[in-house]
Structures are given as C-alpha cells and as structure tokens.
Image: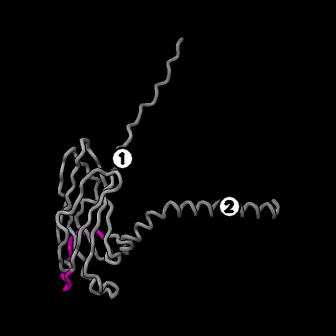
C-alpha cells in the first residue's frame, strides 16, 4: 500500500470519527444542558431534595406563585394562595388548583422555573406535581401540592444577598394522546 493511500485512509477515518463525535455531542447536549441547569440553578431551574434541612437560616423570603397554561391548553390553572413568607430552610407546603372545564379527559405536564434565576440553585422541591403527568377527567378539579424550601446556604452567597422575593412559576401544556397503533395487514393467503 502506498503512502498516499495510507494518508487518504487515515484522513477518511479521522473524518468519520469527527462526524461520529459531532453526532454524539449533539445527542448528548440536551441531557448535559439539563444536568448543568439542575446542578447550577441556571435559568431558574429548581433543585430536588429528599427532605428539608435540619437547620434554619435567619433571612425571611417572600415566595410568590404564578400559574399559566400553554397555547391550546383549556385547563383553568391557578395558585391556591398568591404568596407565602418563609424563613430559609423552613419547609412550606402550598397548592395549585387545576380544573378541566371540557367534556373530555386531558393529560397535561407542567414546566417550571423560579425568578430571579440566581435563586434556582437554592430553591428545592421535596414533592411536586410537576414530576408526573396529570390527567383530569371532564369537569374535574384537583389540588396539587408543592412542598419546598429555600436552602439556608443562600445566606452565604454574596451574589444572592439581594434576593428577598422568589417567584415560582408553572406552565401546564396539554400532552397529545398517543396515536393508536394499527394492526399490520395480514398476509394474503395463497390459493392453491
């Protein structure tokens, strides 16, 4: 094999490896970005906790609640209370109310975030309806609880000293029902 052929072969292998690497990075970018947001609170992404901390901080923070529905979602959706004042580290349970005014069952899923964005790293949910799809029957109204706390370590963050109010916001979107699978056509029988 000539030197020129080997060089072309190595170039082809390198190009193929580069293409595979790009596809792999593109495939992994969404989960990696989601993980980055969850770890850092970037973009107002909240944290998930198994239980509230044992230690309370000194600062009190007002937590406001916002509710929206996505385009085409017919539900009525609102917070049960507009705001609560909590001491950092103190668990608080609030609720949102959803009502399906239609004559059909509807399944929805909620997206969420907090503002200001820098508070996302300190806002932790222990229990939340946003972790699961919600299905409401025609005319059904439900209360959906959220158990959360603001991590006491927010008091040590110099960049978060000005955070006195946090807004927890949810938007419900309708999930399209899965399309039923059609049975594959049976093969035609042979006539003898």
- Depth order, front residue of 133/68: 68
Query: Where is residue 1 shown, x and y percent of the image?
Result: 81, 59
Decide: marks 2, 1 in contact (CB < 8 A)? no
Q: Which residues are magenta?
A: 47-60
Q: Residue at 31% of width from left, 84% of height from top?
A: 160
Answer left or right for 90 relative to 157: left
Q: Is residue 51 magenta?
A: yes
Q: Residue at x 43, y 63 (%)?
A: 31
Q: Residue at x 21, y 77 (%)?
A: 62
Q: Which mark is residue 189?
A: none
Residue at image coords 79%, 60%: 5
Nearer the observer, 73 or 89: 73
Q: Is residue 1 left or right of residue 35?
A: right
Q: Secondary structure at mark 2?
A: helix
Q: How many marks?
A: 2
Q: CA distance from mark 2 to mark 1?
A: 43 Å
**Secondary structure predominantly adopted by residues drawn in magenta:** loop
Residue 24 at x, y percent in the picture:
54, 61
Residue 137, quarter of the rendered image: top left
Sequence order check, earlier mark of 2 and 1: 2
Mark 1 lies on residue: 176
Tell me if mark 1 has few (under 14), some (14-19) or many (20+) residues whose alpha carbon lies within 10 angstroms of its own. Answer: few
Q: Which residue is mark 2?
A: 13
User: In the figure, 137 relative to 80: above or below?
Assistant: above
Tell me if residue 92 is in the magenta stretch.
Answer: no
Direction top: furthest residue: 192
Please name which of the two marks, 2 or 1, marks the residue nearer to the observer. 1
Q: Quadrant of the C terminus?
A: top right
Counting from the top left corner in percent of width and height, residue 149 is at 22, 73
Is the image coloured rainbow, by chain, by secondary structure, or in one colour? one colour
């Amino acid at each position: 094999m000539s030197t020129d052929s080997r060089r072309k072969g190595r170039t082809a292998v390198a190009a193929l490896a580069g293409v595979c690497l790009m596809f792999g990075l593109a495939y992994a970018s969404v989960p990696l970005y989601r993980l980055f947001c969850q770890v850092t609170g970037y973009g107002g992404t909240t944290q998930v906790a198994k239980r509230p901390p044992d230690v309370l901080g000194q600062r009190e923070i007002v937590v406001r609640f916002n509710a929206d529905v996505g385009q085409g979602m017919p539900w009525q959706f609102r917070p049960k209370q507009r705001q609560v004042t909590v001491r950092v580290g103190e668990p608080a349970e609030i609720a949102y109310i959803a009502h399906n005014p239609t004559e059909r069952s509807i399944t929805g899923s909620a997206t969420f975030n907090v503002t200001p964005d820098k508070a996302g790293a300190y806002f932790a949910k222990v229990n939340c309806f946003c972790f699961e799809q919600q299905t409401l029957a025609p005319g059904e109204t439900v209360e959906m609880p959220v158990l959360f706390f603001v991590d006491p370590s927010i008091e040590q963050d110099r960049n978060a000293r000005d955070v006195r109010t946090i807004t927890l916001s949810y938007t419900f979107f309708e999930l399209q029902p899965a399309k039923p699978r059609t049975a594959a056509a049976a093969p035609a029988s042979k006539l003898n």
